[in-house]
Image (tube, rainbow, N blue to C red):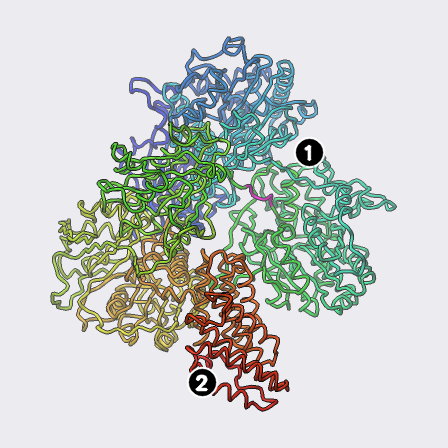
Amino acid sequence: MPNTLKPGEILVHLPGEALPANVAADALPPALTAGSRAAPSAPDLFLDRIVTVEAAFSLVAPGRAGGPESAVSVVDDRLFALEAGDGTTVIIRADKLRDDLARVRPAALRADGSLDLAALHDPDAAARGVAGWIWSGVSVLSLRSDAITADALAKAGEWLRDWLGEAAPDLAPAGASWLGAKALMWAIESRLPGEPGIYHWRNEAPPAASDRCEPGDARLANGADAPILLFIHGAGSHTFASFGDLRSGSAAGDWEALAQRFGGRVFGFEHRTFSESPIDNALALARALPAGARLSLVTHSRGGLVGDLLCLAGLTDAAIATYRRDRPPNTSETAQQKRLRELVAAREQDSLRALRQELADKNFRIERYVRVACPARGTSLLTDNLDVFLSGLLSLTTKLVGAATGPAGSAALSAFTRVVLEVAAKRIDPRFLPGIEAMLTDAPMARLLADAQRKQGIAMSIISGDIEGGSVLKRIGVLFTDWMFFDRVDNDLVIDTESMYAGLAARNDARYLFDQGASVHHFSYFSNRRTRSALRDWLTADEPATLTAFAPLVRRHEPDAASVRTRAARRAAPLRDSRPVVILLPGIMGSHLEVRDPDRRPGEGDRVWFDFLDLASGGLAKIRFDRPDVREEALFDMFYGALADYLSDSHFVIRCPYDWRQALQADGASADHLAAVLKQALAEHPNQPVRLLAHSLGGLVTRTMIAKHPQLWAQLVHRPGGRLVMLGTPNNGSHLMVEALLGKSDLVRKLARLDLRHDMQHVLDIVAGFPGALQLLPRPGFVDNGAALHADYLDAAVWPALAEQNQDRWFGNHVAARPDADTVAQARELWQVTLATGTAPQPVERVVYVFGKADNTPCGLVLDGGRLKMVGTPEGDGSVSWASGRLAGLPDGQCWLMPADHGSLTGTAEHFPAIVELLHAGTTSRLGRLPVLRGAAAATVTYDAPPPVLPTEEELARSILGGKPKPRLPAANLQSLRVSVAAMDLRFARDPVICGHYIGDTIAGAEASIDRYLVDGALRQRERLGVYAGEVGSSAVVLQAPNAADRLRGTARGAVIVGLGRFGEVTTLDIAETVRAGVLLFLLHSLDPQDGDAAPVDDAGSGLTLASLLIGYNSTAHIGIEDSIAMIVRGVIAANRQFADAMPGTRLRVTHLELIELFLDTAISAARAVRELPERIAADLRRLDARVAPAEELREGEGARPRLAVFARFGYWPRLMVTDADRSDESAFDGEDDIGQLPALPGEAPHPPARPVTSRLNYVFLSERARAETVVQQRQPGLIEALVKNAIGRDEYSADLSRTLFQLMMPLEFKATVRDAEKLVLVVDRYTANLPWEMLQAEDQPLALKTAIVRKFASPRYRRNPMILTRKVACVIANPSTRGYHAAFGEPVAAAPPRADHLPDLPGAAAEGAAIRDLLAECGYEVTYGEGLEALDVFARLFHQPWRILVIAAHGVFRVVARDGHARSGVVLSDGLLLTAAEVGQMETVPELVFLNCCHLGAMTVQRETANRLAYSLARELIEIGARCVVVAGWQVNDEAAKVFATTFFDGFVRRCQPFGPAVFSARRSTWERFPQYNTWGAYQAYGDPEHVLEPSAVETEGWSTAAMVSPVELVNALDCVRVALGHAPRDLATLECELGALLARGPAAWQALPEVQAALGAVYGELGAEGFEPARAAYCRAIEAEDGSGRVPIRAVEQLAKLEVRTGEARREIVLIDRAIARLRGLITLCSADPTRPQDAGAEGAAARHAELGRALMRKAAVLAASGGRRADVDAVLRESRDALALGADNVSAERIADQSAAAAALPRGSPGSSKTRPAKARRSKKKT
C-alpha cells in the first residue's frame, strides 16, 4: 500500500483484488464497447484509441471474514468506471467521486484523506428488501485527446471571438464556459451520419439519408390536407432507437392501425440533443414544416420539451424576458463570464421571439399530441449529479435499446458514450450543456412552459411511469445522493414521474395514463403493451377524450372565500342549541390571511396567504409581521373543507381561523381569539356539549387558551360529552421548523423556487419574523428520536452559527433564518411560562390525541461531513414525530394512530367516521394504537434537502401542512375476466362449455352430455371426420345458432373441446396451453362464424361468456381443484391477450368464465378456490395485463346434487426417494457422526471427516404407475457439497446457483418429471436431508415455488407409540434471551471488539411470535406465550404441560463447539444454554405441530443413541419421537422474511384449515413475493404428511374458522353444528349471539334473510329453551313465511315452532301462544293429509305423529286453563280433544299412556301450574319422551 502520494493523487481502498495487468489492459468496461458493432475494419470515430484501462479490480461485498482488500493511488483526473452486478456502470472522475462521497457518504473519507469504496453500500437496504452491495468491479481509465477535442477548442475560440469581440482562451475548455461545452458537444454530434431534419419513416428500418425532407419536399407538401404523424426523440437518441418498438413484430397490430390513419405520412425529426437547446430544435422543426400542416405529435423524454414549444400560443414579451440565467450559487464569475452568461440569455430570448413568429406565420394545426415521459420541469437526479444521470442513461440505452441496425444507430450510441466520457472527464457543469440544461429542475425552461398557454384544439395526453422494486439504477441514485429515499421517489429510472405532468400539460384539458410496475422504465413505453396500445388509441380514436385508459389531469385549486360561502349557503344551517357543537382549529398556515381594513368583513380584503399567483409575484412580503392590517380570513378549504362538511351532519360546526404569525399567548392573539369563540358557543348552545377539534398548531392554541382561560375549559368539561381532540399536535415542538428555518424543508424550497422577487434568504427572513412560527421549534430541553446539535433552538445566538455551517448547492451556502432576540423571546415565553407544566389538561379523560404516520419525519439535526443534515424517523406523521406529539399525563388508552400523514389527518374521508366517534365518545373502534416497540428503537436516517422544483398550486398548498398530492393510480385499462362457479347439471348450460378430451378416448361422460344435449351430436360428427381435439393445443369448436329464448337471454350454446394428449401425461401447463388455443379458436369463430354456426357477434357488446368443466381434476389424481381452475383461467386470459394484440380493431373478448360442477361439495371447494385466484395467479395477471374479478358466492343452478357416497379425494402426491447409495440406514454405526461429509455451516466448527464423501445417490420415483422408477447416480465427491456451502452460507438468492444445483442433483431421467410435478414428497435420509432440495431451479422460477414440496425422513430410530394431544393448547417462545452466549461459545471469527455478550436481537421473531399467538388465540387455542425469556423460564414453560403446537422463533446453532471443546446443536438460550435434542427427547407427549423458526436447525445427524445427544439434530429428534408435522429452517434466514413465512403458514394451516402441504407452499410463495432477494423461502424444510389437516373439517363449521363462505349450504351446515354443540356445551343467549354474529359475518348479509338460514337459526335458538324462545320463534316465522325457492325449509320447521310455542305458553301460562301452536298443528295435519277433507284419518306414520303432538299441545292447554282458574267445562272440552288426537296418534302413544295422561290431567287441582315444566334443553333430551 502506498504510504506517500504525489500531488494530485488520491489513495483509494477497495474491497477486492486487482486483475493482472495484461488482463486489465483489455478489460474495457462492457458499457463502453456496446455501441461498436461495426466490422473491425470500420473505425469508430468516437471511441477508437480514446480510452486506456490503467487498472481494474474485481469487487466483493465488504465485511466478510478473509475478504480481499486492495489499495491504489489514482491521479485525480482519471475516470472510475464502477460496474454493478447487472452491468450498470457509473463513469465518474476520481476527484468528483471523492467530493461526492465526502458529501453524501462522509464515512467514505478516512482521516488521512484517502477514499474507502467499501462505504459505497446502502446500510438500510435489508429493510427495503434488497442487498446492500451491488458492485462487481471497478476500472481506472484515462481519456486521450483526439481530433474531436482539437476541433472543439478551435470552434470554442472562434465562437468566443464572435460573441465577445475578443479572445478568451480561459473560457474555451469545455468545463470552463457554456460556449466551451457547446463546442465540444458540437464536435461530437457533427460527426454523426446524416444531417438534422425531418426524415420520412417508410418501413421497419431506420430512416436513410435519402429519406431526409428539405423544406418544400413533396412528401411534406400535402401536410395541410392529410394528417402527418411526427415522432420527436429524446436525448442522445434518434427516431428508430426511441420508437422502433412501435414497428416490431409484436406491435404489428398497433402499427397497422396507425398506418390506416396516416398512410405513408409518418416522419421523424432528427436533431442534436447536446449541442443545441430544445428552443433551437423547436425553431428548426418549425422552419422545416409546411405552413398549415396537420400534425399528430409523439414525443419521448427531452423530445417533449421540443413538442411543448411547438404547441405554444400567446407567448408574451414578459414571459420571454423572464427566460434568463442567474449566476450559479456558491460561485464567482469574471466580467467575461458574466457578459457571456447575459449574451446566452439574450440569444435564447431572440430564438424564442423567432419561434413565436414562426408559429404565428405557419399556424400549424396540431390535432393530437402524445407526450411520453417528458422532464417538463426537469429531473432531480440530473440536477444533483450529471455523471450518475448520464451513466444511468447510457447503461439503460446499452442494455435495453442497444445499437440500432445500421451505421447511424451504432454511431449514435458511440457518440453518446463519448459525451458521457467527456462530461465526466472534464467535470462539465450541466448548466453549460445547451441540450441538457433545460432538463434541470431550476432551469428557466420549467417556468416558461408552466406559465405559457397551449394552442387551442390540441388533444393532449401524457404517458407517465414509475418503476417498482429494487432496480440497480434506482439504488445507485440512493447511493450518490443524500436526499433520495429509495421507495419515496417515483421515477422511471431517468425522469421524475411528477415532472411528466408539468409544462403545457397543466394547461387546457389534458389526460394522462400512468403505468407502474417492475418492468416499467424509461425505454419501455413503446414495447409495453399497455402504454403502446393506449398511444395507438389516442392517435386513432375519433374522440380520444372518451378513452377510459386515460384519466383527466386534474389540478386542485384553493377556492376563494366567495366560492366557499356559496357552497356553505347551499347547506341548511342547523338551529342553535339543536346539536353538539364542534370548533375546528387549523394548523399553522392553515388559515388564510388577507390584507383587510378593520371595517370590512373576512373575504373582502386582498388574500395573500394562500394566493398562488400572488406568492409567485413576491406577495409573501405583504404579510411580514410588521405589515399592518393583516388578518385571518378563513380555513384552508383544501385541508378542512371536506371534514367540516362531514361534521356538519352531526354537529354545529364553527370554523375558527386565526393569525398563525402571532405568538399564541399574546394579548388578542390566537388563544384569546379562541376563547372568545368558545365563550360565544357556550352561551348560544347552553344545552349542548361543545367540543374542540384541533389540528397541529391548533392543539397548542387550545392548550394556551386553557392555560389563560381555565374557567372556559371548566365550563366545557362540565357538560357531558365536552372534550378536546388533537390531531398531530406538536406538544413538544417539531424539528420540521428547524428544517424550515434552515431552508431545507419542502415548503420553503417550493416557496423560494416559485417567488420571482425574493431569494431563499428573503423568504427565511420573513418566516423568522413570525413568533407563532418560532413557537413550533422544539421545546427547550426536549429530546426527540434523533440526535440534535442544540438543546435549545429558541436561542437567537444559535442561528448565525447554524447559517455559517449550512450548505446548499441550489440556493447558496450560509443561508438560514436569523430571528432577532425580541421575536425569539416572545416565542420562548410560551414554553417557559404559559405551557411550563407541559402536562395534559385536567380532567385528562376529556382529552384525546391522534398520531399520524408517514415514511419520514424530521427528528434531529447533525453535522455530517461538515454539512448540516436532518435526521429522520419513521415514527411520525411527516411533520410531528410521535415523541414530540406525546403529552405528559395523557394515558396511552386515549391515544390513537391514524394511517395518514400530517396534512391528511383532516383530509382523509375514510377516517372521518373515526373522528366523529372520538368527538362523541372519546373512543373509536376504527383506529389502531401506536405500535409497541420491541428491542431497539426504530432506525433513523440522515438526509439533506433535494433539488428544488417549480411547484404546482396543489403541491405548494399540501406542503404547507406536510402532505403531498394523492398518488396517481396506474391505468385501469386491464382486461377483466369475471370468474364464477355454478353447481348445476351441465345440460342446463346456456353458454359454450370447455371440456377436455384425451387421445384415443371415446366421447363419454360429461363430453357425451354436451354432445347430446347442447350441440345436437356435432361432436361425434367432427370425431368421425377426424377433425377433433386430441393432442395438447388442438381443439374443436361448435357454436349453435341461438334460438328465440337464447336471444332473449343473450346466450348461445356450444362446445369448446380441447386436447389433453395421452391419458396420464397431462400437466397443469398443458391445461393452460390447450385452453389458450381452444379459446383463441372460439374467439375467431365468434368473430367470423361459418355457415351453420352462431350469428356474428356484435363487437359493441364485445363481452363473451364461456363455461368450463374442471379440466384435469376428475381425470387425474395429481391435479387438484385449485390447479385446474388456475390453469383454465390462465389459458383464457392468455387467449384474450393474444387475440387483442393480433386484432386491435375488435374488442371481442371472453369477459366471463363460469366453472360448472355437478356435486355441491366440489362446487363449494371450487368457489373457495376462485376467491383466492387473484393472489394465486398474480404473476400471470401482471404479465398479461389482466385482472380477475372472482364471484363472492356459488351459484346454484338446476340439477345440482349432493354427493351420496364417500369420495375421499385428496390428490396423489408423487414420492421421490433420495438416499445415500453407499450406506443403508440399517447398518451399524460406531459412533462417528457422518455429517462430516458435508461442509461446515457458517459460524460452526469444521467437522472432522469420518468417512469419504458420498459418491452415489439412489433415486426412486413413485408415481401413479405400478412401477417404482430407480436411478443410481454417480457424482463427483465434494462438488455438490461445495455448491451447497455457497448456497446456504448466505441468505441472498442466486438463480444461477440454483439452476446449477438442479442440473447436478437431479438425474436426467427425472428432470422432466420433476419440472412438471405440481406436488412432490421428498423422502430423504440422514445424508440427503442436508441438501437444499427446495432451492433447486429448473426454469424461470425455483422448483419449490411451482411445486408444493414436503419432506419425509427415513430413519431406523423412532418412538413406537407416540402420544399426541388433541386439546387445543399451544406454546410460543419468541426471541428468548441469548445473554451469555459468547462467554460459553466464544466470539465469532470476524467480531470487532468490544461486543455485547449476546446474539443480535430479533425484532422480527418477536413480532412473528406475537402474530402467531394472536392467530392461535383467535382459533380457540389456549396459548402460553413467552418473549425475551431466560433459559430456565423457557424450560419451565416447555415442560409445564403437554402441547399440541410448539413454536420457537429464535437463534439456532448446529454443531457449534463450546469452550469445553464439545459440539452443541439447538435453540440458543441465555446463560450459555441451548434447547437440545436431549431435552426434547424427554417430552412424554409429542406435539402434533412443531415450528422451529431458527437458523440451521434443519440439519441432520446420524449417531448411536448413546452418542452426544447435545449435538444431535433437533429436527431429527422431533421427527423420530413422532411429531406429525415439523417445519424447520435449514440455514440462516432473514428476520423479516421469516416472519412472513411463519404468519402465512399459520394463517393457512390453522386459521383456514389448509392441509399441511398447501399451507407450506402458500408460505413459500408469499415469502418469495415479498422478499425475492433472499433465499428464506427455500430455507424451510417441511416434514410431514402433505394432506394432514390440523383440525377435522367439521370443526370449521363450529365457528372457529374465519374463512368466508361461498354457499348458503355451508352456513346452514355450520348453524346445525352449533345446534348440536349446544347440547354438549350449553351457553347463555348473549354468548350464543356473539358466536352467531361471527358466523353470519362469514357470508353476505343477504343470506341471513334466506328461509333455510332462518330455519337453522330457529333450531339453534330453540336449544336454549325459554331464554331463546323469542329469537327462535321470530326466525321460524320468517322461515315459513318466506318463499322457499331452494326447497330447503322442512315441514319440521313448522312442527318445531309449534312445540316451542306450546312449551313456552305453558311456562308463561299464555293460552294465546298455545292456541297459535294448536292452529299450526291442525293446519299442518290438514295440509299433509292424503285427503284434506278427512284429516282425522291418521294414515301414515308422519300424520300419526302430528296428531300425537296435537294431543300433547291440547293437554298442556288444559293444564294451563286449570291452573289459571278456567271453567271445568272448558278444561274437559279441551281434554276430550286431546284424548281424540292422542287416539289418532296411537302408533306413537300407547293406549295405556293416553289413559294415564287423561286421568292425570283430569285430576289437576285448580291453581296448579300443570304437569309439564319447561326444562333446559339438555335435560329434556335426557328424559325419555312420551
Please tell me which of labels 2 and 1 falls first in the chain: 1
Res 898 quadrant in image: bottom right
**In the image, 1600: left or right of 643?**
left
Image quadrant containing the C terminus: bottom left
The magenta stretch is 964-968
**Front in this rendered view, residue 52 or 71:** 52
Please state the horizontal and vertical placement of residue 1523, each as a whole percent of the image.
29, 68
Please state the horizontal and vertical placement of residue 91, each as a whole percent of the image.
41, 34
Q: Which mark is residue 1793?
A: 2
Question: Is 967 inside the magenta-drawn segment?
Answer: yes
Kind of residue sitting beneath label 1? Leu
Q: Which mark is residue 756?
A: 1
Q: Main secondary structure of the magenta part?
A: loop
Please state the horizontal and vertical placement of residue 111, each as a whole percent of the image.
44, 48
Q: Is residue 1201 visible?
A: yes
In this view, 514 is above or below 1118: above
